[in-house]
Amino acid sequence: MLDGFFKGIKDYLSKILGVRGVRRIGCYGSPNAGKTTLANRIAMDFAGKEMGTVSPVPHETREVTELEHVELAHNKKKLVINLVDTPGIATKIDFEEFVKFGIGKKAAKERAKEATKGVIDAIKWLDKMDVVLAVMDATKDPYTQVNITILGNLEARKIPVIIVANKVDLKKADINNIKKMFPQYPVIGISAKTGKNMDELYKTIFEVAK
Amino acid sequence: MIKSKVSLEFIPYEALRGLPLREQVKYIIAKTKENKILVFDSKLTAEEEAKLISETMKNIGPKFSGIEISSLSKEDKRLGEAIKDWIFKILTGKNRGTSIIGPAKIIKQIKRNPESISIAMK
């Protein structure tokens, strides 16, 4: 709550003084939507390093990570951001799901325990964000409770959102369905894995984060 | 053979009204742990949903793997209905609609589209 208060003061002062400091941009979404792949892509493009490991096993990212002072450049403009990758938000975590991926029972239980803490931390960090990239897997039904809860909380906090429809390199991807379900938000179709359409995303980040 | 008993409870928002959010969430989680599927006659706010998810995570263990939840708001845009929505929100702080919450171990999926909710059991 206090974070939100201070963020409000910071935004107000920035507005009246006409200056923009470092913008904190976070990747949010369900597990396996491609948040870390996207964070890695942005970090590689502008900082020359990756932020986290990617895995087909859900909840690979179990801690919030922040890469500070990343200088984005697009069309001769510059924007300094702190890039935040967050654990996937879920309403259920069953260690047996991890066992199906070949993880031992003890390690799976530990992974589940860490994943629950990760979800709580991801929600706590919402208040600290200046802009959020709501990452959705474009091959799946976007109208999930997790996506709706994330967008609803951002709306309540007046935090600008860009919906990133990820995995457009796959045949099943359907960006139009996401646009139809969430017509009030900018939706950019990309492939974080191949880099497809990242320029369009960077252009939109500059527009939204200004 | 019946493996486990599942019950469906319809709960008017009035039943929780006046309780602090923490108590409301505690009540919901306690009920879902008893294998109950709860149907509320109002839509949870985004903040309530986030709080419910956070508290659910704190409760996850060998016997409780979490919840399935789906909220549907009433999207009738006729003037009369819009006024009713507004009055309902002023009086209760809630949005008119429906929320369904149940234990993940017995609900496979609550699928929703903007107009309806369907529950698939395991």
Image (cartoon, rainbow, N blue to C red):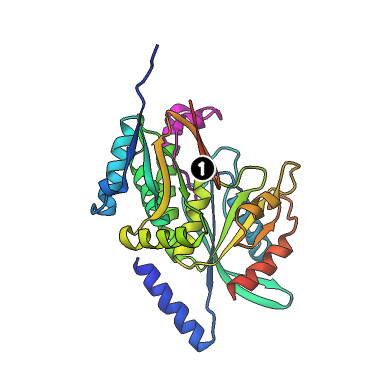
Residue A76's spot in the image, x, y percent? 73, 78
Residue A81's spot in the image, x, y percent? 57, 70
- Horizontally, is B91 left or right of B100 in the view? left
Q: Is residue B66 visible?
A: no
Residue B70's spot in the image, x, y percent? 46, 43
Residue B105's spot in the image, x, y percent? 42, 29
Helix, strand or loop under label 1: loop
Closer to the camera in the image, A34 or A52 = A34
- Chain letter of disc 1 in the image: A
Report the span colored magenta.
A87-110
Q: Is residue A78 above or below residue B35?
A: below
Residue B81 in magenta? no
What kind of residue is marked 1?
His
Residue to which mark 1 is pinned:
A59
Q: Is residue A15 above or below residue B103?
A: below
Query: Which quadrant is home to the N terminus of chain A?
Result: bottom left
Residue A91 in magenta? yes
- Horizontally, is A103 left or right of A121 in the view? right
Residue most toward the front?
B80
Image quadrant of residue A132? bottom right
Query: Which quadrant is home to the C terminus of chain A?
Result: bottom right
Closer to the camera in the image, A70 or B62 = B62
